[in-house]
Amino acid sequence: MITFTVENKVFHLQAKNSSYLIEIAPTGHLIHLYWGKKLPQTADYRRLLSAELRKKHLQSETANNFKLDNIPQEYPAYGNSDFRQPAFEVRLADGSSLSNLKYQSHKIASGKDKLTGLPALYVEDKKAATSLKIKLYDQKAELEVELSYTVFKEFDVIARSAVLTNKGQQKIVLERAFSAAVDFIDANYELITSAGDWSRENHLVRRSLQPGLQAVESTRGASSAQHNPFLVLARPEATEEQGEVYGFNLVYSGNFFAGVQVNSFEQARVLMGINQFDFSWQLKASESFQTPELVMTYSGKGLSKLSQTYHKLYRKHLMRGKYKEQVRPILLNNWEATYFDFDEARILEIAKAGSELGVELFVLDDGWFGSRNDDTTSLGDWFVDREKLPAGLASLAEKVNNLGLKFGLWFEPEMVSPESQLYQKHPDWCIHIPGRNRTLARSQLILDLSRPEVRAKIMEMLTTILESVKISYIKWDMNRNMTEIGSAKLDSDQQRELPHRYLLGLYEMLEELQQSFPEILFESCASGGGRFDPAMLYYMPQSWTSDNTDAGSRLKIQTGTSLFYPLVAMGAHVSAVPNHQVGRSTSLITRGDTAYFGNFGYELDLRKLTQTEKELVKKQISFYKQERTLIQTGDFYRLLSPFADQLDTAWLVVNENKTAAVAAFYKVLAEANQPGRYLKLAGLDPQKYYKVNLINQLKTEVKLYPETAVYSGVELMSVGIVLPEKIVNLLPDGSESRGDFQSLVWKITAVTANT
Ligand code: DGJ
């Protein structure tokens, strides 16, 4: 619900349990009054900005000492007494950079509009959300800025974006156009961001805010594995279960900036949007620029609640298509099984082994097209390699279907190998700067998707395959970042528009594919989690979380990714040992137990498993099939964090009505002679009683209680499950798995009476 009180000129945005307050100041500037726990409608909330500040600095722009520098604002400008980082920056025809936005008009309506050319949250039922649009205007610059706010009835979420329009005749250049700025009245927060790289995505970092600017960003043309486009401000005492936390997640897949500036008055300003680094945008007369959407969440109940809000919101109001509400198929991908070395017979044998064990979808990864026997050639030549697959793709798909499996295919459509027919024909179709070296990464270059003819050619090749082969799933990969950023088609003064124009082109292609092939399940990938962001989830409802499939590494990667993204979005596969990325051997039990907490699959040559291992795989698959609705749609809790000193990790998913849960504990480093510990659960109903059953674990040493025992929800949440001193897993062949990286999984089921 959103209200506007005419007398005091205050907007009150009410989300489920939170309020956000905006005031139109007497000077016309848009003031931020509050964001936090829900407040009643009644009061005059102008009192939330100190009367002294108002009087001293905000009476009139022409009065002595008018100053916006310590006034919390909604979309701060540059050049008129606020010395902090602005939300946007312009270069006007007279060479000046100053701007001064004043309230012009507003509109409140139910529902939520689409963003032109960009992915965003949506509602199917208008009653699910209310939107406020406030128009601000700079008369001198003839610049209009329309700020959009949407509140969701069932969520503590506010989605923000802005549209900047040139209302005059003179060209305006945008040097910065962030999606939003949010001013906090104090800076007593800690900042949580992600850090990492290929194969170690989303490691979480938590630090106190310090005076000055602290930020993460991407300048790589993709949202990146180095920092995900999110940040959290958490009160120092906030934990997973309690305390105030604020989340920010940008619905964008390119260069971003996510920063917090603490000024000399100890106020914190959060700024997020397209990175101004290597960005500018020309607005000719009547032209507009739409910023990406920023999804902001408030939780008064710690980080678990924040994550659960994002998870549900993204499942309901971001993901689309057939698979939005459907459980996802268990897939088998041949990449780590064969790499480029396969033919039809080998592929079919691997697929057959998967089918016999209960897999539902077979995915043929890289190497099926052009003449690609390694990663040096053929990107751009999207036609089947008849040497490897003489009978063609349609025939292969049919044979895979005959094994009882759906068929999926890998593409990397945004790229071109210099050694390809496409590149030979169109050497200027890649992103490049004439006269400069074209830096190769994984022997490839990026196609210039800002050009319609490039997009059209790629779409034509993809469509030919999709119309002639029965494909149920596409893995859309992207394996390098932008260098020598230039387009042969853009004017010299528009070259800095290329990274964003590239994304607009990519989104247009993805939208067209979604509309033309609604039956296909898309999974995005960028050398793993190099572009795992909400924008991609809008087009592709799952994403390959990391190329690192080691169960030990995945504890950190999946924990970090879960801060904002739902488990159903996170591809998680059991792979071979020793692990191909880190060389570590973990038991098949631990590999399964880790991959359960995601979108489950396999990525190894299942033929090579022993009979007893195959039996365990069968068990894993049937367990996941039985529990996947719960895992993919339940409330997720990080009970123990791999980022803490102890390293031990524990995860839990509870269904909506709190009648069933799956919990897991991962002992990272084995210790001798450890005291018994408890694993406290969360999210259960304290009034209910539950059975607690170990899954897949056969060793008596860990059965510290009778299988038939019944526990109250309150006991499980306040005392917990007693953990064994050491975990010894009995493998199906009778051998023991002990030492580091052992795990336990429990199924927790509500029972009707206390027995
Ligand atoms: C990178 C991906 O992350 C891998 O899963 C695999 O698809 C390779 N590309 C194929 O080249």
Image: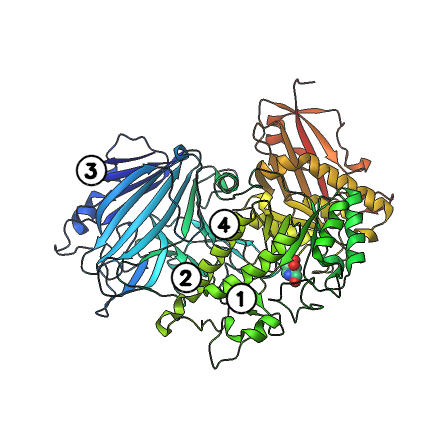
Q: Quadrant of residue 39?
A: top left
- The residue that label 2 is drawn on is 275
Q: Of the residues shown, which amino acid type is indicated by label 3?
A: Asn
Q: Residues within 10 Å of mark 4 (few under 14, many from 20)?
A: many
| Above/below status of 584 relative to 21 | below
Mark closer to the observer (1, 2): 1
- The residue that label 1 is drawn on is 481
Residue 603 placed where, x, y %? 72, 53
Residue 613 seen anywhere in this rendered image of the structure: yes
Between 244 and 19, the one nearer to me in the picture:
19
Q: In the image, 531: left or right of 287?
A: right
Q: Earlier in the sequence, mark 2 or mark 4?
A: 2
Q: Earlier in the sequence, mark 1 or mark 2?
A: 2
Contact between labelled residues 1 and 4, with CB atoms less than 8 Å apart? no
Residue 170 circle label: none
- The residue that label 3 is drawn on is 8
Ligand 1: give its quadrant.
bottom right
Q: Earlier in the sequence, mark 4 or mark 3?
A: 3
- Within 8 Å of ligand 1, the CB of disc 2? no
Mark closer to the observer (4, 3): 4
Contact between labelled residues 4 and 2, with CB atoms less than 8 Å apart? no
Q: Of the residues shown, which amino acid type is indicated by label 4?
A: Pro
Work out how far the residue at label 2 is from the one at label 4, CA to CA, in angstroms: 17 Å
